[in-house]
Image: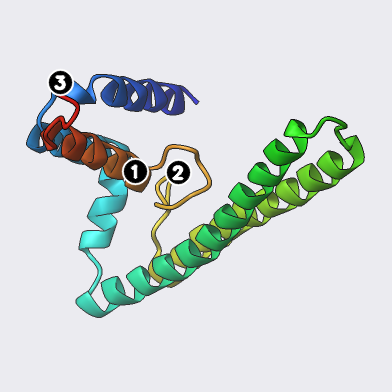
Amino acid sequence: MKKLIVTTMLLTSMVAFSENVSMPVKTGMMQQLNMNMGTGMMQQIDKLTPEQKIQMEKINLEYQKKNQEYLFRIKQIDLKIETEMLNEKIDTKKIGSLIDKKVSLQSRIQKNMINYRIDIKEKFGINVMPGMMQGSHNNMNMNQMMNDMNQMQIKKQEPDLKK
């Protein structure tokens, strides 16, 4: 639990101060964070054969794809909820139904992540730490953070056309 809190604080501070840091430094910080969180797991992965690494990546992508589909549907539900909240007469039953659908999808994501961890452990003997699977249901995962940081860097480099 302490690791999760510290990691969350670290990620938040990295995003908050990212506009003042160059991309190579940001990338280095992210690599260091990954190494600190998953050094044992990375050492286990390094011991895999090239074929096993390819197989592991295929499994990872398969689970990510499933989760991304669920995440997309969750975003659609969130938009429907927000749209319903804009109506003059709010249908609380409809919102309740949408929330139930959202919770069901979130549950599927969590089960999917558990199945991923079990698959990796059974096939490769690697204990995947919770949260290490990229593309997880967390609001701020590593892929998203790197994408956001890249977007900030691009915007910073674009000329200001308003001047």
Mark 3 vs mark 2: in front = 3
Q: Which amino acid does label 2 sit on?
A: Gly
Q: What residue appears at the point 19 percent right and 27 percent down from the top-left corner?
A: 162
In primary-sequence order, the first of circles 3 and 1 is 3
Whether residue 17 sits left or right of residue 1 in the image: it is left
The image position of residue 137, as x and y in percent, is 53, 46
Q: In which quarter of the image is residue 94?
A: top right
Mark 2 vs mark 1: in front = 1
In the image, 117 versus 95, the foreground residue is 95
Q: Give the secondary structure at mark 2.
A: loop
Q: Note whether residue 11 is visible.
A: yes
- Separation of marks 3 and 1 at Cα, in angstroms: 19 Å
Q: What residue type is labelled 3?
A: Asn
Q: Which mark is residue 20?
A: 3
Q: Name the residue under label 2.
A: 131
Q: Give the secondary structure at mark 3.
A: helix
Q: Which mark is residue 142?
A: 1
Q: Note whether residue 114 is visible.
A: no
Q: What residue appears at the point 68 percent right and 54 percent down from the top-left corner?
A: 105
In primary-sequence order, the first of circles 2 and 1 is 2
Whether residue 117 sits left or right of residue 47 in the image: it is right
Q: What residue appears at the point 9 percent right and 30 percent down from the top-left corner?
A: 22
Q: In which quarter of the image is residue 90?
A: top right
Q: In which quarter of the image is residue 145?
A: top left
Whether residue 87 sits left or right of residue 147 in the image: it is right
Q: What residue appears at the point 43 percent right and 52 percent down from the top-left corner?
A: 135
